[in-house]
Amino acid sequence: MLIRSQPLDSQYSEKYKSHLKESEEMTERNIQSQRIGQLFDDMDFDSECSFCFKRWIIWKYRDVRDFYYDSKYAIRNYRIWRKTINSLRPWDGFSGLISVMQTHLKDYIETEEKYGHSARDFKNQKIASAKETVELLERMKEPHEYTSRRRAEVDAKYPEYKSLITEYKNGGVSSSGRFVALGQGWVGMESGRNPREGYFEFVNGIFELTTSPDQHETDRLLDELRKYNESIDAAYMLAEIDSDKDFERLSVLLKENLYSWWD
């Protein structure tokens, strides 16, 4: 998709038509006033100096004008970009790029809302697409949030598992799994290549499988833990799908709107 013209708001149309007509009339007068032949050969020394002086004045005026606008926007940009620039680090990678994109799009949205010249519907569409892009970038800047949101949904279904033991010392070695307290021990499942499951107690400082004081309750808890583990695994898969969908949507937004975000 290439850059294309944008429909003007009606309140700006007449002004631009008037300006365009004036420019065309000036161009026509200039063409009519040109003469064939050598332009400067018949000028005397004084008129040539006068021409050079006027041209020098015009150039200097343009230099001063450009310097004014450069200084004006340098100050403005520092105010808007200061927080983003100060937070950037060379090792940020994707998060740094996303922060820069967000800051610029937010600035663009604010400017478009106040000063945009496009027709209302077209202007609203540009602003809406830019805002959606900012929201997508916000989610993508913190990838672990995809997992956190899905994990929170699972934890809400198993509120009693918020206090699950997930790490323990077994003879001085750190091990992990998911366990829930029962009596003097814990019911759960170990992690690793050869996981154990059942009722555990510490015997001489070692986490060992032992006879459960309530085998029926142990079996019930183990069944719940299996479902919990399956739900957690599914949550991670859904988080990956959520992330992929956001990337796909961002691709569509950029393709359809990147060259429209100007005024």
Image (cartoon, rainbow, N blue to C red):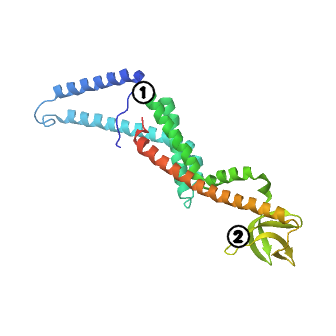
Q: Residues within 10 Å of mark 1 (few under 14, many from 20)?
A: some
First along the sequence among labels 1 and 2: 1
Q: Which residue is mark 1?
A: 119
Q: Residue at x 55, y 50 (%)?
A: 99
Q: Residue at x 74, y 61 (%)?
A: 223
**Residue extending furthest front?**
216
Counting every numbered tag in the picture gives: 2
Q: Nearer the viewer, mark 1 or mark 2?
A: 2
Q: Residue at x 48, y 49 (%)?
A: 248
Mark 1 vs mark 2, CA separation in Å: 61 Å
Q: Is residue 185 visible?
A: yes
Q: Dividing the picture into quarters, in which one does residue 168 lie?
A: bottom right
Q: Residues within 10 Å of mark 2 (few under 14, many from 20)?
A: some
In the image, taking residue 143 as reference, residue 8 lies left or right, namely left
Image position, residue 220 (x, y; %): 79, 60
Whether residues under marks 1 and 2 lie with C-beta atoms below 8 angstroms apart, the answer is no
Q: Amino acid at mark 1?
A: Ala
Q: Which secondary structure lies at badge 2?
A: loop
- Per the rendering, the mark at residue 215 is none
Screen quadrant of the N terminus? top left
Q: Is residue 116 visible?
A: no
Screen quadrant of the C terminus? top left
Image position, residue 184 (x, y; %): 89, 67
Q: Which residue is mark 2?
A: 191
In depth, the one of 50 and 85 nearer the eye is 85
Q: Which secondary structure lies at badge 1?
A: loop
In the image, taking residue 4 as reference, residue 157 lies left or right, namely right
In depth, the one of 172 and 218 nearer the eye is 218
Q: Amino acid at mark 2?
A: Ser
Position of residue 86 relative to residue 66, above or below, is: below
Q: Residue at x 79, y 77 (%)?
A: 172
